[in-house]
Image (tube, rainbow, N blue to C red):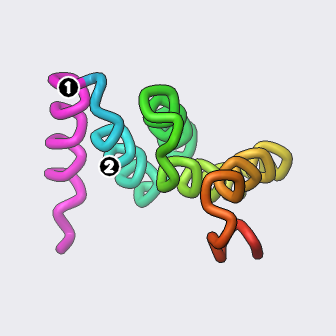
C-alpha cells in the first residue's frame, strides 16, 4: 500500500520494545530487504535466527539477502540449513 515508512517505524519500535520476539526481527528485515538496505536486513534475519533457530522463513530470507549481497557461500550455508529443516523447500532445492 506504499506505507513503507510507517511500517519501518512500527517495526523498529516493536523490535525495541520486544527485542526477544523473532517475528519482529523478521518483519523488520523484510522491510529493510524491500528498501534494499541489505546489511540491515542481514542483521535482522541473523538476530531472528539467534532467537529462534528453527525459523524457516528467517533462513530463507537470509539466504536471499546473501544472494543479493553476492555472498554465494553464505547463501549456500543458509539454504543448506533451510533444506535440513524443510527438505521439500522449492527455493532451497533450486
Q: Secondary structure of the magenta portion, mostly? A: helix
> Is residue 39 shown left or right of residue 66?
left
* Residue 40 position (above or below residue 67): above
- CA distance separating discs 2 and 1: 13 Å
Nearer-the-camera pick, 67 or 45? 45
Element marked by disc 2: helix
Please give the name of the residue rendered at 20% of the width and 25% of the height, measured from the top-left corner: 18
Using a 10 Å C-alpha cutoff, classify the residue at mark 1 as few (fewer than 14 neighbours), some (14 to 19) or many (20 or more): few
Q: Quadrant of the C terminus?
A: bottom right
* Residue 44 position (above or below residue 58): above
Nearer-the-camera pick, 76 or 30? 76
Residue labelled with disc 1: 18
Residue 88's x, y, as percent? 65, 72
Element marked by disc 1: loop
> Is residue 27 shown left or right of residue 54?
left
* Residue 79 position (above or below residue 17): below
Residue 54's x, y, as percent? 51, 42
Residue 1's x, y, as percent? 17, 74
Residue 61's x, y, as percent? 54, 55
Residue labelled with disc 2: 27
- The range drawn in magenta is 1-18
Q: Quadrant of residue 10?
A: top left
Q: Quadrant of residue 64?
A: bottom right
> Is residue 38 shown left or right of residue 71?
left
Using a 10 Å C-alpha cutoff, classify the residue at mark 2 as few (fewer than 14 neighbours), some (14 to 19) or many (20 or more): many
Please give the name of the residue rendered at 38% of the width and 46% of the height, measured from the top-left corner: 26
| Outermost right residue | 73
> Which of the labelled discs sits on residue 91, or is there none?
none
Amino acid at each position: 500500500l506504499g506505507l513503507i515508512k510507517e511500517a519501518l517505524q512500527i517495526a523498529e519500535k516493536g523490535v525495541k520494545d520486544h527485542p526477544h520476539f523473532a517475528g519482529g526481527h523478521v518483519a523488520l528485515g523484510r522491510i529493510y530487504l524491500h528498501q534494499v538496505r541489505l546489511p540491515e536486513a542481514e542483521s535482522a534475519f541473523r538476530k531472528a535466527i539467534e532467537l529462534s533457530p528453527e525459523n524457516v522463513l528467517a533462513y530463507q530470507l537470509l539466504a536471499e539477502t546473501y544472494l543479493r549481497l553476492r555472498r554465494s557461500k553464505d547463501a549456500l550455508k543458509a539454504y543448506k540449513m533451510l533444506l535440513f529443516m524443510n527438505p521439500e523447500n522449492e527455493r532451497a532445492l533450486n
